[in-house]
Amino acid sequence: MKHTCAIVLWTVLVFGTSVSQAQPLSQGTIHFSTQQYAVSEAAPMATITVNLDRRDGGEAVVAVQCYTINGTATEEDYEPVNTAVAFAPPLAFAPGETSKTFTVPILDDILVEGNETLTLVLTNATPGATFPGGLSSAAATLVIVDNDFSPGQLDFSASSYTRSEGDGNASITVIRTGGRTGVISVNYHTVNETATAGQDYQATSGMLVLADGQTNKTFVVPIVNDMLVEPNETVSLVMTNATGGATFPDGQPSVTATLTIEDNDGPAVAAPAIVGLMREDSLLRFRFTGEPSYDYFVEFCESLSEANWLCLTNYRAKIQPLEAIVTDSLTNGAARFYRIRKQDCQCD
């Protein structure tokens, strides 16, 4: 964990030959050579140039304090690493000299942290010297360019996926975040939850390989479309064994998601039941239960032992209960058995 306390590095830059000389007015303007410096994290130090735009011949001594303030870069990224204010020995400038440098030591780590910055400040100039805009100080930025690169972190694009039983396939996307350097791979497989492999989906396993710079890849889980009326069912999707330096969230050894397969078969329909029968000569009046949008057939046979039922007529259910009125030329004294059969259902 990085600390956020400010670390200050002081250096005194002296322009001229002696700090004891009397200072004339208007000794010039002190400023950084640029508003932003950049240095690789692998470099031992950053060299910062300070310029003095001299006036009146430029022979007088001018001094300035130079220090750094933590930004996103802290004492773990550059020196010094203590909180004491330390003045470096004065730097002697030759007469008429107009530029001077100081260095910021850089600490190279192995953390993937992105570029980081700190602020460079000039202040407390010798009387007669000024800063741009008449301000009491001048500032610039030092960028420490990260030299560590991450293979990335692997995860599913969502914690849950939903597909209809009739979709045929479920495409599952694996994403790579936090870095994309190098070739990495990961194994994946499915695990039964309420869905059963071979009945509701096809068991799937394999390896995904992501090329250098590639940030996502997909695999497919085939879905079985059956004719069963059943609740929605679920499958676990699992990734394990990330290679090439890739990791899973929170340092876990694996990551999971859920695939829900939505049933596309209609709700179960109850078998019809005869609730009333009245005969008037050849006219038969049936009252029976049923459900709308299904066809119901009035059938008969001469014996319950027969397998060949004959249809008298059929009715489309629209209301509940239903009534069927059919004509049957049954002669007096003959026996006949009747049933109501629902469409696609061999039920009495």
Image (cartoon, helix red, strand yellow):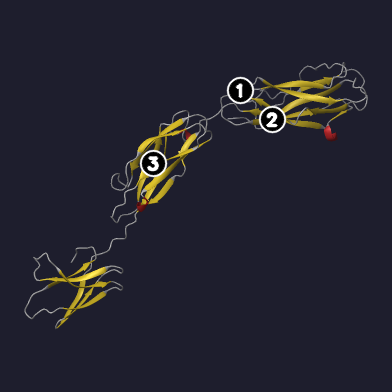
Rate crowding at label 1 as few (under 14), some (14 to 19) or many (20 or more) other CA atoms within 10 Å.
Answer: some
Give coordinates of residue 15: x percent, y percent. 85, 20
Residue 23, above or below 217: above
Image quadrant assignment for residue 116: top right
Q: What element carries label 2?
A: strand
User: 142 and 308: which one is in front?
Assistant: 308
Give the residue at mark 3: 237
Label of residue 118 in the image: 2
Residue at horizontal 81 percent and vertical 25 percent from the top: 51
Residue type beneath disc 1: Asp
Quarter occupied by the C terminus: bottom left
Looking at the image, residue 182 sits to the left or right of residue 23; the answer is: left
User: 196 and 81: which one is in front?
Assistant: 196
The numbered mark, 1 or 2, whose residue comes first in the sequence reads 1
Q: Is mark 1 on a helix, strand or loop?
A: loop
Disc number lying in front (2 or 3) = 3
Distance (Cα) linking label 3 and label 1: 40 Å
The numbered mark, 2 or 3, whose residue comes first in the sequence reads 2
